[in-house]
Image (cartoon, rainbow, N blue to C red):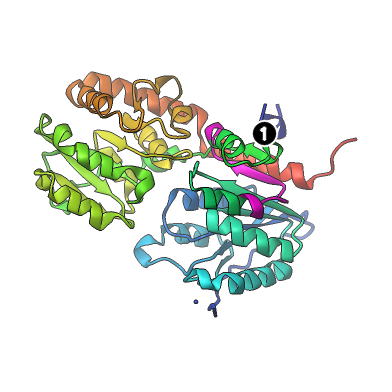
Amino acid sequence: MSNRDSLKFYPATPFFVTFTSIYFERSRLPNQPATIPIGFVTTELGVGGAERCLTNLATQLDSSRFRPVIYSLAAPPAKHRSELIDQLATAQLPIHFLNSASKWSYFSVVRRLSHLLKEQRPEILQTFLFHANILGTHAAKRAKVPHILTGIRVADPSRPRQYYERVATRNVDKIVCVSQAVAQFQESIAGFQARKLAVIPNGIDVQRMDESKPMDITEFGIPHNRRILTFVGRLQQQKGVDWLIEMAPQLLTPLAEFDLLIVGDGPQRTQLESLANSSGIRNRIHFVGRQSNIPGILKRSELLLLPSRWEGMPNVIMEAMACGLPVVSTKAHGVIELLGPHADAQTVAFNDETTFLSLVKQFCQIPTHAQRLGKLNRERVQNHFSLTTMVQHYEALYASLTEPHEP
């Protein structure tokens, strides 16, 4: 079966913007066939799930066939969050930063991006994340880019966002969803056209996870002998950390050896820390902010907790699976697809506090149960969600847009 045949479509399937660019010239051998130029547009290039997917894809594409250029609407991230930029630089890929700082820069950013696209003339433009989908498609249409792809990574219930994204992407070639659940949501709830939707799950570099060592938790001020339950994600309503902290007294009181590690930052951090302060067990809930060594943290943890209200295909679950960890997650979009036949033992409905607590207790108190599920998770992510498979599916999609079709 060819890559194209294996690609499953859904169904069956500030006013002035400073411009910064980092550019690396790529050499071409004499008589080398022309490569297909592809533009990738993202909202930012800090360390996040979508940004890591973009980086993995851009750096792993077949360089004899495709020539990526990356455009970030935002300014370069702080140095401690520049891991992905370092990867792109190592791969000698061009990066352009548009330094957008507010919604008032919309039209200026569109003009700047459109100008760059006219200069560089990509055959395909692919956008990642909501703001990139809106601005990127606008600029691509102005620049007359032949083929436009957008990406939807979460089943966001916000009606205004659904409307703006639906209008902006009306004339794109394809809308790539990271899971069947997200595609179904976009069709049945958000009103997207089914014929435009394609499903390409995220992939993970298992070798990268294998190379990491368990992190020393004393760096966070936690005694070395404590056992760790971990949440990783942005601290915002979507992720349900408020619900997790509300459950924390019932969760941690009977598990005297365990502490809860909250990894990430976001708009709800102050509110969540206040909630933890009133829990009565504040000394066992640790907010450590954004961290670059997520694999090392997961390898030092005994269980990943993901209490999300909605998702798409959460990368952190894939990372936990690759580390051989069991998880306790809500049945958010894409989670069931990730965990597959082992989902029932690791998922609960949002707000089902009783079952959530019960599953956590089982994993913490029955080590053999945790080890068995962790091993099964590891096998599943290796077999079904490899980075190579993800890249092959994107390559097949690009080829379906640019290669001549047989009569």
Q: For residue 308, which quarter of the picture?
A: top left
Q: Position of residue 297 (x, y in %)?
A: 27, 44
Amino acid carrying mark 1 in the image: Phe
Query: Which quadrant of the figure has residue 398?
Result: top right
Farthest front residue in view = 159
Quadrant location of the C terminus in the rendered image:
top right
Q: Nearer the viewer, residue 114 or 68?
A: 114
Picture coordinates of residue 276 (x, y %)? 17, 48
Magenta span of residues? 166-181
Q: Position of residue 251 (x, y in %)?
A: 17, 33
Please, which residue is most extreme toward the right here? 407
In the rendered view, tell whether residue 323 sits above or below residue 169: above
User: Could you tell me which secondary element the residue under label 1 belongs to?
Assistant: loop
341 horizontally vs 226: left or right: right
Q: Residue at x 68, y 69 (%)?
A: 114
Position of residue 201 relative to residue 264, above or below, is above
How crowded pointer 1 is (Cα within 10 Å; few <14, some 14-19, many 20+) is rated as many
Residue 49: % across, % down = 45, 48
As for residue 227 lying within the magenta part, the answer is no
Asked whether residue 230 appears in the rendered view, the answer is no
Q: Which residue is mark 1?
A: 9
Specify whether residue 341 is in view: yes
